[in-house]
Structure formats: structure tokens, C-alpha cells
Amino acid sequence: MSAAANGRTPHAFGTSTTSPYWMGKRTSELLRIATAGSVDDGKSTLIGRLLHDTKSIFEDQMEHVVQTSERRGDGYVNLALLTDGLRAEREQGITIDVAYRYFATPRRKFIVADTPGHEQYTRNMVTGASTADVSIVLVDARKGVSTQTRRHAYIASLLRIPHLVVCVNKMDLVNYDENVFYEILEQMTDWMARLQVPDITFIPISALNGDNVVDRSDRMQWYGAAPLLYHLEHVVIAPDRNLQDVRFPVQWVIRPMSEEHHDYRGYGGQVAGGVLRPGSEVVVLPSGRSTTVASIDTFGGALDSAFPTMSVALRLTDQIDISRGDMIVSPEDQPVASRELDAMLCWMSERPLAPRGKYTIKHTTRSARAIVEQIEYQVDINTLEHEPATQLGLNEIGRVQLRCSAPLILDPYSRNRSTGSFILIDESTNDTVAAGMVLNAR
Amino acid sequence: MTPAHYELSHLETLEAESVHIFREVAAELERPVLLFSGGKDSIILLRLAEKAFRPGRFPFPIMHVDTGHNFPEVIEFRDRIAAQLGERLIVAHVQDSIDAGRVAEETGPRASRNRLQTTTLLDAIAEHGFDAAFGGARRDEERARAKERVFSFRDDFGQWDPKNQRPELWSLYNGRIRKGEHVRVFPISNWTELDVWQYIATERLEVPSIYFSHEREVFARDGMLYAHNQFMELIEGEVPFTESVRYRTVGDMTCTGAVRSSATTLEAVVTEIAATRITERGETRADDRVTEAAMEDRKREGYF
């Protein structure tokens, strides 16, 4: 094929181009799933089943798994080997990190952040959960709701994953008995009342036999609802993003200063909330100056609207001094610019957090120095009890008060997962040491 | 308008995430560079950089590590695309590393410069003082890559420590480094091979001609088809023949295999990829077959 026949289309910036044929028909949406659990739960079997039944495991990958399982003497095809990519993981038969798996159906593309479920991997679970739309929690039908199940559900609620799917697994080992399923459903529902999860779905499955994973099970006629994959394909996620309050953290100022674009000044960023249109009135924080959106630019041409999670460049009608770290917001329901805040922290470093510790805080596109003024309490993630604490160790979660060297433009995490989240960085090691969720500005 | 209208397709979502990553690196690191191989993944990186920074110029140069054993079609493509974009292209030559005695050429019929590239790459990063290097690696490609961060820290020896990676939360990337260290940044970590081809079709991007079916003189080795070329000695019993093939990946001629194919258009390639039952690296890359953890081992040393 000649180069001309599939030629790179010359794009004139700022002029509207016709939609490429592919974009014309809607392709599919992207759904991010977080799973947590250990081999005992059948989590690997479940993921293996989803990948296998959606034809997402390639022959050479499967061959590799079969051969390695045989060589190790596993005695079965160990699907965990699909995700355990590192030498140490295969040697020790453990999962030490977040693995990302990809599969697709005609309706959706799925990204699975697969994390180990034990308490010492809480930080990995938090990492996997931070961007997830759906969390899958597994319960062993024989054992009922365990400490580990509760911990996973707590992390899903702490990270505000909007949809939780509780898979009651190994139903084959309890004769597909509906009483077992409903008992677990009740136990879990009671306990979940203490957490804030907007949408919970319970599905009885056998990952091993494929019951209610991809296809509806004949052996559980009493269960009237859809199997897992159908649920994942249809759960509605678009309204989970905050479409009310405009939030546009400025990332990068585009100033070509070329002949052709001499006066061009565009503010590049990713929409973190709300819907912007040309003509929208906006306020720039922290200065508080008001202006109007002149145009929403992309490489492919100007747009009529921008909404989460689009990356665009905004041009504004007034010449205002705006730089990285500023935020363009709607005049109503503005975020609060504050140096002081209350937050939940998940500690991720071997070196514990001590009160008065100083760190770099990174929030949206803004960084500052932060000091932890006080640890109010630590959460026992198994019982949800609040305990007094003088420090937070690796994998521990607690509520803290922070004071920063410069104002941050804050929303509660419950209102916006982008403008309500932050990380702490240890200034001596440059390591990311904590994940933070804003409760409120003070 | 109902909220249902505010939906993005999976490609739009992936694109927005990648553009965000490009802008973060440009804003937070001093001297980034974009590693360009001429392959499909780095072609996507160029388009994403246009989406992130136009009508401005790229706030970084493009760099190619040239083994000297590349497909001529790809080298021609590289030079033309860089000129078309009007961006600065740096070429680091493995031959220069050999001439300077930094690395020794492998010998024999299975000799390859694939591994030597690491030294050339790390030397070039040090010479230019780059503190961030964009690469087109994807997590669906390979087991070790499935575990790698978007911002992947390299120590002052260029090494990756897979057991000691920084947690990566939300879209808050930590690019803090000391002098001499750098980060490898993978903006298309979450894209699959099919996503890449769908995007190429959507954006009507030009790719080197070897990605499409063509007649080529090839020979069979280790279950793969290699181009019969001046850099590879034939082993006894290997007989070149002409076959209708295309490439699924673009690497060095000495370690990249071709696949039998009749796909001559982008649409035909997308269809072929959607139906394939073998991974791209499994089908076409000899460099991953050395040991079970071949990629992990090379990455630890500072490979792409």
C-alpha cells in the first residue's frame, strides 16, 4: 500500500474537520473495574473466566500458563500466572502489585485493576480503586462475609467507587442453595448500611463452572437478575461524573508566539467537572476574576461543549494572568481556596507518618508543602472502629488535619473525585507516601 | 440534554487520559524527550503530542535509537514525518556506541543489536540531560509491562526496580527525581493493540508501508518468518522464499518476525487484529523468547 493511500490527513488547527468515519458510529465506552482478593477467593479464576469467555486470552498466553503450571507442579491450570508478571511473583506464587488486564465485548472495553486482597496490600487496593467505576468484591459462599470482604467493601466506599458488585462465589459447593445466597446478602446489606455506596448488586456465581459469570446459570433459576458480564456491560456510569460544577484545573498554557498564532493563548487541561460551552461564564481561582469562555479548542477543531474527562484547550474573552495550578470554575457552587483541610489518608510508606511531618502535597495541577498538624484517629479497617493514633504506619488509614504553604482549591472528595483527591510526597526520598481524600476545607 | 449525552467512547477516554499525561510531563519535568521508533505505538504518541500542544510546538525533541539494522522503509518514514511535523529529530546510533567501544557487536547467525540499544539509549539520555522519556509501551503487550507505572522511575544507572514502584493514584503523577535519575513515561499504557489500530484508522494516520501486506523474501526460523536481509546469516537448511506478509510490530530486522497476511488496508488490518488469537510480541518478537522474564530483565537494565 502506498503512503498516499492511507495518508496522514493534514489538520489545519482551529478549523472544523469532518468526523472520522470511526467516530461517526459510537464505538464503546470504557469501564474501569477494581478487584481485590486472594487465590482462595477464586478471584483469579473469576478474572480468568471473564478473559477466557470474552476470548481475551491469546493462545500463546494460555500455552505459557499451561506450561508454567505444569513445570511448577500446580496440578491445575493456574490462571493467576496470567496476571503475575514479575519474576518474584511467579517464584513466590504471590501477587505483589496492581496488574492491569484488558478485555472487551462489542458493547464496552474493560480495564481491570487486579490487586492482592490481604491486609498488607491495602495500599495496592487503594491504588487500584482510585480510578475505578465498579468494584467487584468476592464472598466465599461457604464462609459467608469475612473480615477480608468487609475490608474490600470499606476501601471501595472510602475511594467512592460508585458501583459495588458482591459476587457470592463457589455456589457450586453449597448446592446452589438460594438460602445461603440470601443470608449473605442480608449480612452484607446490614453491614454496608454503615458505608456510603450508592449502588450495590449481589450476584450468586460459580467462577469455576462459569455460572452467572458470562451466561445465566440454569442451576440458579431462583436468581432472576442478570449475570456478571451483562451487569458490567450495562451499569450506567456517565452520571457518576459531576456534571453540575465546572472544574477545569489549568495544566499547561499554550502560547505558540508564532507568526500565524501570534496572539493565541489557550489553557490546556482535562475537564474535572461540569459542562463548559462557548459563552459560559466562569471564575478563575484563586484570583476570583470573572470572564467568559471564548472557545473550546482541540487539535481536530473547536467544540460546542466540553465535559469530564475531555482534554481540551480553553480560550477566554478577557486577558487575565492565568497559569498552571489555577482552576477555572463555574460562578455558582465554587470550590474553596484554603490552606487548611481535613482529610482521610491512606499511608503507603514503610516510614510512618508522624504528627508535624512535612511533605509535598500534589492536588490537581497544584503543588505546595504540607504539614500534618494532627492525626484525629485511625480506622480499624476490619471493624470500622475509630482508634486514637499518634502515627500512621504502612497500609493504615486515618483522619488528619493538614496545613499547606499555599491555598489549594478544594472540593470534598464525596463531591468530586478529581478535585477532592491528593497525594503526599516525601521530600527526602521523592516517594509517594500517601493517598488523600478531602473531607472539607477549614 | 440528559446526562446520557455526556458520554465518551473508549478511544476518546483513552485519548483524553494520554493528552493529560503529555501535558503533566511537559509542565513538571525540565527536559523531556519523545522516543520514536517509527512503529505504530510511537506514531500514536506523535499525534497525541499534537493534540496536547498544537498550535504550539512540542516542548521536547523526538529521538530515535537507530540500530543500523532497521527496515529502510521505516527510516525513510521517520525522516519524512519529523520534517512534516516541523519538530526536532535526534538520532542516536548504536554504531557509534560500537565504534566508541561502549558495546561489543554480537556475532553469529543469531547476532542482534537489540540488547545493545540500551547502552546507546542511556548514553543519549545522559548526554542530552533528558529527565523524562516518553515511550509507546503498553500494558497489554507483555507480563512485566502489565505491572509498570505510567510514570516509571529510573535510577541513575537507568535501572527499573519493579518491586519498588511508586504508587500511582487517580491521575496524580509523581515525577520528582534527583539529578541523574529520569522517568520513562508511557502515555498509552492503557491502550490495547486493537485500540491503537482503531485510533490509526480514526485519525487516518500514516504508518510505514511494512505494516501492510506486501511480497517479501523471507526465511523461517524458530517458527517465525524473518526478512532475508544482509544483517542475518542463514543457518544451514534455511531457504529464503517469497511470501505475502506484513509486520505487526516494527523493530530491528534481526529480531522482528513477519506474519502471513493479505491485509492491504487499515480496515483489513483492524479486522485481522480483532480476530487474532496470538499476542503481537508472541508472534513477532524473538527478543521476548530468550527466557520467561526476558522483558523484565531487559527493562531492569534500562531497556525501553
Image (cartoon, grey):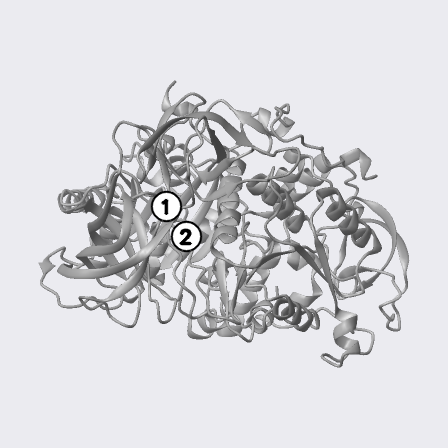
* Front position in the image: A102 or B103: B103
Q: Eyeballing the image, is A185 above or below B258?
A: above
Residue linked to disc 1: A132
State yes or no: discs 1 and 2 in contact (Cβ < 8 Å): yes
Q: Name the image quarter holding the C terminus of chain B.
A: bottom right
**Mark 1, chain letter?**
A
Which label was assigned to residue A179? none
Label 1 sits on what residue type?
Ala
| Residue beneath the point at 42% across and 74% down | A92
Task: Give me the C-alpha separation between circle 1 and circle 2.
Answer: 8 Å
Same subunit, labels 1 and 2: the answer reads: yes
Assess disc 1: are there few (<14), some (14-19) or many (≥20) residues with their C-alpha within 10 Å of its C-alpha: many
Q: Name the image quarter holding the N terminus of chain B.
A: top left
Q: Pick whichever of labels 1 and 2 is earlier in the sequence.
A: 2
Disc 2 element? strand
Q: Give left or right: position of A42 versus A310.
A: left
On the image, the x and y values in percent for residue B107 come to 81, 78
Q: Eyeballing the image, is A397 above or below B79?
A: below
Which label was assigned to residue A113? 2
Q: Give left or right: position of B215 versus A43.
A: right
Q: How many labels, in total?
A: 2
Assess disc 2: are there few (<14), some (14-19) or many (≥20) residues with their C-alpha within 10 Å of its C-alpha: many
Q: Eyeballing the image, is A91 above or below A176?
A: below
| Residue beneath the point at 45% across and 26% down | A317
Whether residue A139 is visible? no
**Mark 2, chain letter?**
A
On the image, the x and y values in percent for residue A138 come to 30, 51
Task: Tell me the quarter of the picture where residue A291 sits.
Answer: top left
